Amino acid sequence: MCHACVMDRVKQGMLSRRHLFTGAAALGAASVASGLISARPALAQSSGRVVDLTHAYDETFPTFDGVPGITKEWAVKFEESGYQLWKLTIFEHTGTHIDAPLHFSADGASVDELEPQQLMAPLCVLDITAKAAQDPNATVEPEDIEAWVSANGDIPAGACVAMHSGWAAKLGTPEFRGTPDGALAFPGFSKAATDMLAGLNVASIAVDTLSLDPGNSQDFAVHFSWLPGGRFGIECVAGLDQLPAAGATVFIGAPKHTGGTGGPARVMAVV
């Protein structure tokens, strides 16, 4: 989600949560190590097929607040100088991008502080396309996680759990962002689900929509609980329909600007 329309809410909700990170750091280290161990055999058994989970984006790409997330202008033109480059102005939370813990906490880890081991993880894909087709604000619930585990086995510690709602196919239409009257409407995670995933030592979650929370959320409960716990999220993911429910390994090309609350990312999966 982007900055402008929730800034006041974020400022009001931001409290120092340093004590949360003390416990999360020890738990997170174990989760990261376990996730990395789980990813290695999956890679060894993979076909080597790479799926790009990243949308290309420009100033027309939908954003949470409706403000263009990127603008560009020529800084140097080839015909004038023999080489060329753009000057880019980018908001961090646009396109396929990372939400770092610092995004919704006063003193959480910034995007450059994410452990490299967290950026390669087993990928678990939860398919909620059927209920998302009936309800644009559908959410991943604990029973969806339980159904996934029943069908695929335990979710590895350190994993990235992705919500496949079918929303990526709506990109380029007004429905990707919301309803004809301008209301935000898209699927996301429920807090009950992310609380369960936190208990399973999952390191990150991903969505194929504009926000970890559903479009009709008024309290951003997932952002305010998941991110300050030392975990991160990925929004506006593409290509989940090309992946199995289990067995893929995700590579998250997080940006590394100092003190960043997140930023555009190149995300890929190996199957």
Image: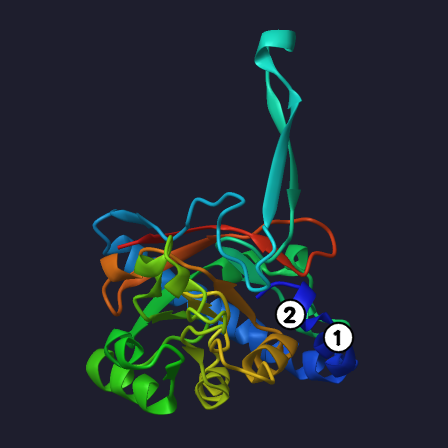
- Camera-near label (2 vs 1) is 1
User: If the image is split into quadrants, where does the C terminus sit?
Assistant: bottom left
Q: Residue at x 71, y 78 (%)?
A: 9
Q: Is residue 225 visible?
A: yes
Bin the neighbour count of mark 1 within 10 Å (Cα to Cα): few under 14, some 14-19, many 20 and up.
Answer: few
The disc placed on residue 101 is: 2
Q: Amino acid at mark 2?
A: Pro
Q: Position of residue 183 (x, y in %)?
A: 49, 74
Q: Amino acid at mark 1?
A: Asp
Q: Secondary structure at mark 2?
A: helix
Q: Is residue 176 above or below residue 128?
A: above
Q: Is residue 203 above or below residue 243?
A: below
Q: Quadrant of the rendered structure where residue 240 is?
A: bottom left
The disc placed on residue 8 is: 1
Q: Residue at x 48, y 80 (%)?
A: 201
Q: Residue at x 59, y 50 (%)?
A: 68
Q: Nearer the viewer, residue 97 or 220?
A: 220
Q: From the viewer's perspective, is 60 left or right of 133?
A: right
The disc placed on residue 248 is: none
Measure how far apart labels 2 and 1 are at the Cα level.
18 Å
Is label 2 in contact with label 1 (beta carbons under 8 Å)?
no
Q: Is residue 99 above or below residue 188?
A: above
Bin the neighbour count of mark 2 within 10 Å (Cα to Cα): few under 14, some 14-19, many 20 and up.
Answer: many
Q: Nearer the viewer, residue 189 or 5?
A: 5
User: If the image is split into quadrants, where does the N terminus sit?
Assistant: bottom right
Q: Position of residue 44 (x, y in %)?
A: 28, 54
Q: Secondary structure at mark 1?
A: helix
Q: Residue at x 31, y 85 (%)?
A: 144
